[in-house]
Amino acid sequence: MCAALKVTRQGCYAWRRRPPSAHDLRDAELAAKISEIYGASRGNYGAPKVFAELKRAGDRTSRKRVARLMRDNGMVGTTRGRARRPKGAAKPAAPQANAAPDLVKRGFSADGPNRAWFAGIAYVRTHRGWPCLAVPWTYGRG
């Protein structure tokens, strides 16, 4: 096996007897703290928030190191779903066989109040999704 790995037998035995490095010891210490923070967040925190908690506690490390240790220990933060745009908003609608008749015949003028009714529909982006806002109004003076 030493020949396949291109190492000497003495080097392999020396490596096995060598104590863990300071970096490995610090990684083990950080992994324990990360696991504690991750457990306290009920598995929700990802590397940026765990890093912020460590920084607040006074531990000096990097976000990439926290991410590596979390990845190595199988810890994954929860991601929120991205708000999606409503389907079909970008493409013009295809003509439908049983579409509503055009009662105003594309004439957007009225000879008095309450003669022609119109409605506007808009999708408003919120933290909870894309609710539809529909507003009716009349056209004409009065």
Image (cartoon, rainbow, N blue to C red):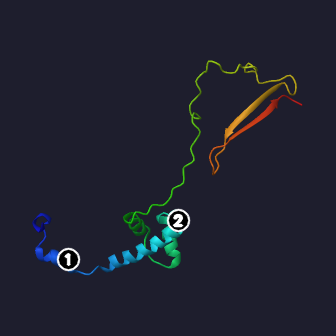
Secondary structure under tag 1 reads helix
Residue 75 sits above or below residue 26 on the image: above
x, y (%) of residue 141? 87, 29
Residue appearing at x 43%, y 71% in the figure = 62
Q: Is 1 in front, or is 139?
A: 1
> Which residue sits furthest left?
3
Crowdedness near tag 2: few (<14), some (14–19) or many (≥20) residues, C-alpha within 10 Å: few
Sequence order check: which comes first, mark 2 or mark 1? 1
Q: Which residue is mark 1?
A: 15
Crowdedness near tag 1: few (<14), some (14–19) or many (≥20) residues, C-alpha within 10 Å: few
x, y (%) of residue 96? 61, 21
Residue 142 sits above or below residue 42 on the image: above
Badge number at residue 42: 2
Q: Judge depth for marks 2 and 1 and give the one in front.
A: 2
**From the viewer's perspective, is 47 left or right of 126?**
left
Residue appearing at x 23%, y 80% in the figure = 18
x, y (%) of residue 40? 53, 70
